[in-house]
Amino acid sequence: MNDDTVTVMSALPVVLLLTSLVPALLIFALREKQTVLRTTLNLAGAIAKVLLVIVLIPRVVAGEELRAEFTWIPGLDIVFVTDTFSLFFVALSAGLWLATTIYAVGYLEGSPNRSRFFGFFSLCVTATVGIALAGNLLTFLIFFELLTLVTYPLVAHRGTRAALRGARIYLAYTLGGGVALLLGVAWLTVEVGPVEFRAGGIPEVAEFAARDPLTATVIGAVLLLGVGVKAALFPLHGWLPIAMVAPAPVSALLHAVAVVKAGAFGIIRIVEDVFGLALFAELGMLQALAVVASVTIVYGSVRALAQDDLKKRLAYSTVSQVSYIALGAALLSPIATAGAIVHMVNQGFMKITLFFCAGLFAEELKLSKVSQLAGVGRRMPVTSAAFTIAALGMIGLPPFAGFISKWALGLGGLDAGQPWVIAVLLTSTVLNAAYFLPIIATIWTSPRSESEGSDEGTFPVPARRSGWEAPASLLLPAVATALFVILFGVAAGWGYSPWVLAQIVGEGAWP
């Protein structure tokens, strides 16, 4: 909290949670045939959350902090706070939840168990928003664990052997991370008392670290281990590619909105709002985090190169790209902090576009491998264009959103006196190009004809009620998020753009 921040007790943080919690509970009670009511509840909750965020952004940016707290038992309080960082993450979650809801309604049309799916879907967003609004470590822990439990049924949704195996592996990894987080939270609470997030770090934690630096270092490492599983830091990333057996809307949710972003958000909270950057550096933890993040960035990109399955290539890309956030958080620079924070949004919109498009290729043409995509650009030009925009953004080419992230992180590395960061970013960019450009080239290359002995160019053409290449509920979300990838790059300096808001949040980490 900055000195000029005004704290106001308000029910609005709770209302933000209820906009997805209430629809979830109602949806569970619906029959499968109540399609219109289920869709209405989904969209009403998603739109309400977006509108509430829009209303709150000017107030929070102006220095108003909304707070709601409840005493669970004496000494254990549940606290929700809308500071600039929490609202930034809520805005990302709300916007992409709306897009994914529209996409999921179309994607799952006619499939079984939709009430169960959309109930857990909304609970997933509730848990993510709870993580964002958590004002202390206890509240963060509760919603972090809830996120694990409510995403398991989404990964296992199809009920196939592969889906159940992927869900079990996901659960094993994330529950293991949850145990580590629980240990770290309990241990730190015993040492310093209830831990409320504070920009620049908590004075009681600094005092404890001065008395017992070794124990403070161990606790910090345990906390990072706990959130690092969901952030897919190497070598804790193994669950992510396997969980790609989930339906495309779930893959989009895991990579762009919920799980991996919750882990990245947790890293920033622990580093900057529990220990503080200066203390974390003094304990040697920043250097260790920077090394792990850099290794993960390169490792994920190298593994992506070898994947012919499109969703798995995108999954390993996420392993790499999310670690940009951890790297930015590990550098002693306000610019790097802002770069890490803006990449949460930029990567979210780019990656959700890619998964939307991968889902369209699989749903409309039954194609799931990179080697099968030759000529898809002619059959599905709009989808292919959206994929191309997002992929170029992931590489970091201007004027797309990904360029802003990489530019800020590079400047942050120089500002922190760590020029080796430039080498990591350049290596990653070359590898990004190596695994994305061939996909783009394949998509826009005409397939071989059947007379040449290949069936790669023979696409099923489903009957449509309109001339669109895919149902509007599937196509429009991909187009919309792709346009935001352009907008967040071109208009990075305007108004309440993600980059402008990220700079405000970044400066707040240096009180």
Image (tube, rainbow, N blue to C red):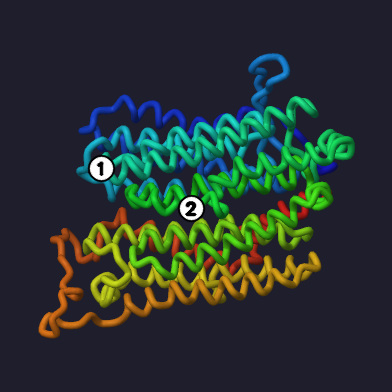
Observer-nearest of 455 and 116: 455
Task: Please give the name of the residue rendered at 71% of the width and 55% of the height, measured from the top-left corner.
Answer: 288
The quadrant in which residue 159 appears is: top left
Q: Which mark is residue 160?
A: 1
Q: Can residue 503 be seen in this view?
A: no
Residue 95 or residue 358, whichever sits in front: 358
Query: Which of the numbered marks, if any, corresponds to residue 256?
Result: 2
Q: Is residue 34 above or below residue 388?
A: above
Left or right, residue 137 beside residue 390: right
Left-right relation of 131 to 201 = left
**Horizontally, is 97 left or right of 38 in the view?**
right
Q: In the image, what residue occupies the spot 32% across and 75% down?
A: 443
Within 10 Å of disc 2 (Cα), the crowding (few <14, some 14-19, many 20+) is: many
Most extreme residue toward the left is 451
Q: List x then y, in percent, for residue 133.
A: 62, 37
Q: In this view, does 408 lie above or below 43?
A: below
Secondary structure found at label 2: helix
What amino acid is found at the position of numbered circle 1 in the picture?
Thr
- Is the N terminus in the top left, top right, bottom left or bottom right quadrant? top right
Q: Which of marks 2 and 1 is nearer the N terminus?
A: 1
Marks 2/1 in contact by CB < 8 Å: the verdict is: no
Q: Position of residue 184 (x, y in %)?
A: 67, 34
Q: Residues within 10 Å of mark 1 (few under 14, many from 20)?
A: few
